[in-house]
Amino acid sequence: MSKMRIEGSFVALITPFNADGTVDFKAFQDLLKFQEDNGTAAVLILGSTGEISMLTMEERREIISKTARMKTGGMKLFYGCTGGDTKASIDLVRFAKGEGADGAILAAPAYICASEADIEQYFLDIAESTELPMGIYNNPPRVKTDLGHEALLRLFQHPNFVVHKESTGRVGQVAQVIAGNPDVAIMCCDSPNLGLVVPTMALGGHGTANMTGNLAPAEMAALSKPWTADTDGFAFRESYMRLLPLLHYTYSAINPVAVKSLMKAVGLPAGDLRRPLTGLKGPALDKGVEIMRTLGLLDQYGLNAATRIAAE
């Protein structure tokens, strides 16, 4: 069997909630269709954008089971399967595989601040536990554990790893991983403050693993297209500079506060954030709506700009 290859926009999807705080599965279905219809190659469900740390294990399993049945055979559905330790992560990966997931994304367990050697072994142990395709999310700003390029390239020799998302902010690390020519898709976080998008794509990266695609999926799909011709860099520059205000806005508050608040304000089925997080209001929210309007995204996607009244 050939190894899975993902290129383009890999969107970290929000978790939509009903007014009573339960998971809104009708909204999940609508959001998945919205992504697939607009060129998204894959989505990550149950990532940090999906408020995973505030979901119970029962909710996580229910989300995996019900959304995996929404697959159409086109866009790939990956699930965040990071647990508090190795066994918990393996259990969730095996559950996801049994329910029909296309893949799993794993980060280092949060809070424990394990050594690089321990986390390298953690990823390897999980890869050995199942044949489900997996991705590594190197995200030291969030989990306080960092993997260098040598450890990553060793891990990518395992056939179950198919994608890598880098969020260190070190351009040199991205270059060293790509230079190692691993058989995985190399992607980066879309945060403009980390500054990885431009160099990752210029160095031969395969796309972005992003959250801005929740609001502008077609635009992120275009931005995340690998460069194959001399003119691709010029087209990318034009798209990136145009989207830069929205990219900065989506990272203006801790993930996913800005994204989810703006989605709700413009009529996308998002619901509220789970407490203790609360949504943006007033001028902070209006700024995001104005960015969407200026970029033409409200008209393009038929969204409602009721802004503050609808959000509050």
Image (tube, rainbow, N blue to C red):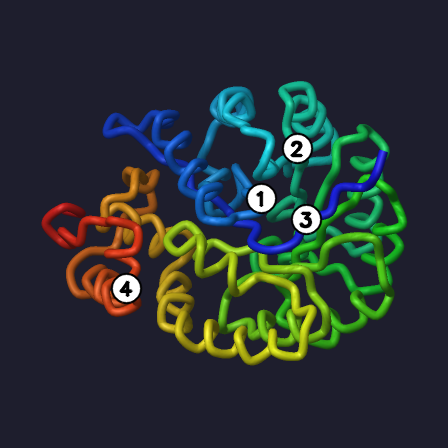
Write the residue at 30% across / 67% down. Answer: 295
| First-in-chain label (3 vs 4) | 3
Badge 1 marks a residue whose secondary structure is strand
Between circles 1 and 4, the one closer to the viewer is: 4
| First-in-chain label (4 vs 2) | 2
Q: Is residue 45 above or below residue 182?
A: above
Q: Are marks 1 and 3 in contact (CB under 8 Å)?
A: yes
The image quarter containing residue 247 is bottom left
Q: Which mark is residue 102?
A: 2
Which residue corresponds to mark 1?
42
Disc 1 and disc 3: Cα gap in Å?
7 Å
Q: Which mark is residue 6?
A: 3
Write the residue at 37% across / 53% down. Answer: 215
| First-in-chain label (1 vs 3) | 3
| First-in-chain label (2 vs 3) | 3
Q: Is residue 13 above or below residue 63?
A: below
Number of residue marks = 4
User: Amino acid type of disc 3?
Assistant: Ile
Which residue corresponds to mark 4?
296
Percent of width and height locating residue 75: 57, 39
Badge 3 marks a residue whose secondary structure is loop
Mark 4: give few (<14), some (14-19) or many (20+) Cα within 10 Å: few
Q: Are marks 4 and 2 in contact (CB under 8 Å)?
A: no
Mark 2: give few (<14), some (14-19) or many (20+) Cα within 10 Å: many
User: Amino acid type of disc 2?
Assistant: Asp
Percent of width and height locating residue 175: 76, 73
